[in-house]
């Protein structure tokens, strides 16, 4: 009898460890809120603000917060009021929105092989099917289809394989969006954009 109880306790413990090791999906598929963006266009917002996070860096972070999380960058430079920071394939832009000297994130972009992941465990190289499973239906979908009518069918196909893409956007609010670029069914880039 005692061995049977211990066996059930062990099974329960293993199941709990497995469940808690899964990516954070508990807050995915939020019931959409309907708002207007800064340009006055109607939008839906289907993710929570904390889901707009890549490699533990939230969209609300300042430059000093990013340094605290990721350490010293590979490179950093300023041009026309924008600060550009690179962490080996994880690219940031910062701006001083308030004029007080604090630099806030404008955008975060991943390179294909950066290894960067969202807080929900999504990363470049994954199938686009994971987006619906994790985030539900996108708030907007933008598809780029390139056609060069004067090229042969074979050359046109090569061109399309390289250029065609679909961008799935999930809005957190009027100012913050999480975007996934998909090429040939695979996530090639993840970006977070923060409007002023």
Image: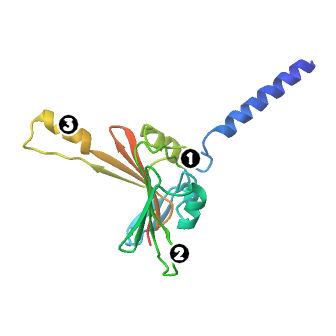
- Report the residue at 72% width, 31% height from top: 15
In what element is the residue under mark 3?
helix
- Mark 3 or 2, nearer chain start: 2
Rendered position, 131 above or below 173: above
Tag nearer the camera, 1 or 2: 2
> Which residue in the structure is indicated by mark 3?
158
Characterize the local packing of mark 1: few (<14), some (14-19) or many (20 or more) Cα atoms within 10 angstroms. some
Circle 2 is placed at which residue position? 102
Frontmost of labels 3 and 2 is 2
At label 3, counting other C-alpha atoms closer than 10 Å, the crowd grade (few under 14, some 14-19, many 20 or more) is: few
Q: Could you tell me residue 195's position as x and y percent? A: 43, 69
Q: Which quadrant of the structure image shows residue 148?
A: top left
Coordinates of residue 167 in the picture (x, y in percent): 36, 50
Q: Residues within 10 Å of mark 2 (few under 14, many from 20)?
A: few
Instruction: For marks 1 and 3, give the one nearer the viewer.
Output: 3
The image quarter in which residue 51 lies: bottom right
Mark 1 falls on what kind of element?
A: loop
Residue under pointer 1: 120
Looking at the image, residue 164 lies above or below residue 52: above
Quick check: can you spot residue 6?
yes
């Amino acid at each position: 009898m005692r061995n049977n109880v211990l066996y059930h306790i062990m099974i329960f413990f293993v199941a709990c460890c497995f469940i808690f090791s899964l990516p954070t999906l508990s807050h995915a598929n939020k019931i959409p809120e309907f708002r207007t963006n800064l340009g006055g266009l109607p939008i839906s917002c289907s993710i929570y603000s904390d889901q707009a996070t890549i490699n533990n860096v939230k969209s609300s972070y300042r430059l000093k917060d990013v340094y605290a999380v990721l350490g010293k960058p590979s490179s950093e430079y300023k041009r026309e009021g924008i600060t550009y920071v690179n962490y080996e394939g994880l690219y940031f832009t910062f701006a001083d929105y308030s004029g007080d000297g604090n630099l806030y994130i404008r955008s975060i972009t991943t390179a294909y092989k950066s290894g960067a992941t969202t807080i929900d465990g999504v990363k470049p190289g994954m199938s686009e099917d994971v987006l619906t499973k994790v985030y539900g239906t996108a708030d907007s979908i933008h598809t780029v289809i390139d056609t060069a009518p004067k090229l042969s069918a074979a050359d046109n196909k090569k061109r399309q394989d390289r250029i065609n893409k679909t961008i799935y956007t999930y809005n957190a609010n009027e100012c913050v969006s999480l975007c996934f670029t998909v090429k040939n069914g695979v996530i090639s880039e993840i970006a977070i954009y923060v409007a002023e």
